[in-house]
Image: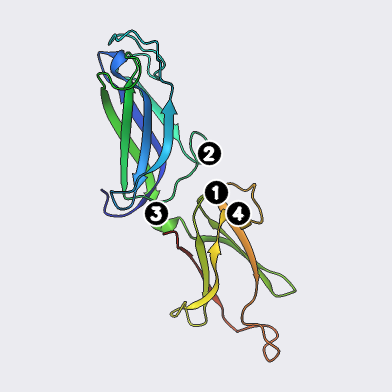
Amino acid sequence: EFAEAYVLTHFTITSNNDSIGRNPDVWQILGSNDGVTWTIIYAYDQNDTGAPGNRLYAGNSVWTVGDQVIRWNGGGVDFPTPPPYKWFRLNADSAAGWPGTGGQLSLAEVEFFGTSGGAAFAITEISTASDNTITLTWDAFAGRIYGVYYSLDLVDFAFDINDNVTDAVDEVPGDGDKITFSFPNPTVTTEAPFGAPALYLRVVDLTP
């Protein structure tokens, strides 16, 4: 468990130094924020049902020699950018040298690399149009629910613009791990046709 949540950017796994048949051929990297409910971030499943039960048989494992370091990258390269998690773990179900699940499993090292989750929801772009439409873009994660709020004093953000924004309503779906969302300026009225003199916006992750 980490003291704060992190967005996993990449991870490395090092094979054991003697018996390549003990490296897994079915395994997952998982994340959690409570240590109870776990979400798969990356999964490898190449179970060799014809493996001979030999600790020197590499089979379908990604590792072919001992002490081999392999890196997997997020951002859509090897796995999509996940949401921030405080817990990370590797779960292995099958050793390469053994048929089916189980066998004598062994790895040398697993390392996780990431960035603090607190920076993940920063608004990266904001624009306004002549029809008083405001457009926001922020770093986001698939399957998450976001709320957009505003304040007139930079203290009270109780004003709700939309509390159910997901990647399904992303106006620019091809821009990677971002959401672009537009809405009318909520402070424009007949008496104030240009809106409030100051408007502050905030995006919050509301995913249960």
Q: Earlier in the sequence, mark 3 or mark 4?
A: 3
Q: Amino acid type of disc 4?
A: Ala
Q: Are marks 2 and 1 in contact (CB under 8 Å)?
A: yes
Q: Which mark is residue 76?
A: 2
Q: CA distance from mark 1 to mark 4?
A: 12 Å
Left or right of 123: which side holds 70?
left
Q: Which residue is mark 4?
A: 168
Image marks 3 and 4: residues in contact by CB distance under 8 Å: no
- Which disc, if any, is residue 177? 1
- Dot 2 falls on a residue whose secondary structure is loop
Disc 1 from disc 3: Cα separation: 14 Å
Say whether marks 2 and 3 touch (CB < 8 Å): no
Q: Quadrant of residue 170?
A: bottom right
Which badge, 1 or 3, comes first in the chain's sequence? 3
In the rendered image, the vertical position of residue 171 relative to residue 79, given as above or below? below
Of badges 1 and 4, the one in the foreground is 4
Residue 161 in picture, x, y percent from top left = 56, 73
Mark found first going from the N terminus, 4 or 2: 2
The local secondary structure at tag 1 comes to loop
Packing grade of label 1 (10 A; few <14, some 14-19, many >=20) is: some
Query: In percent of the image, x 60 and y 54: which residue is there?
Result: 168
Q: Are marks 1 and 4 in contact (CB under 8 Å)?
A: no
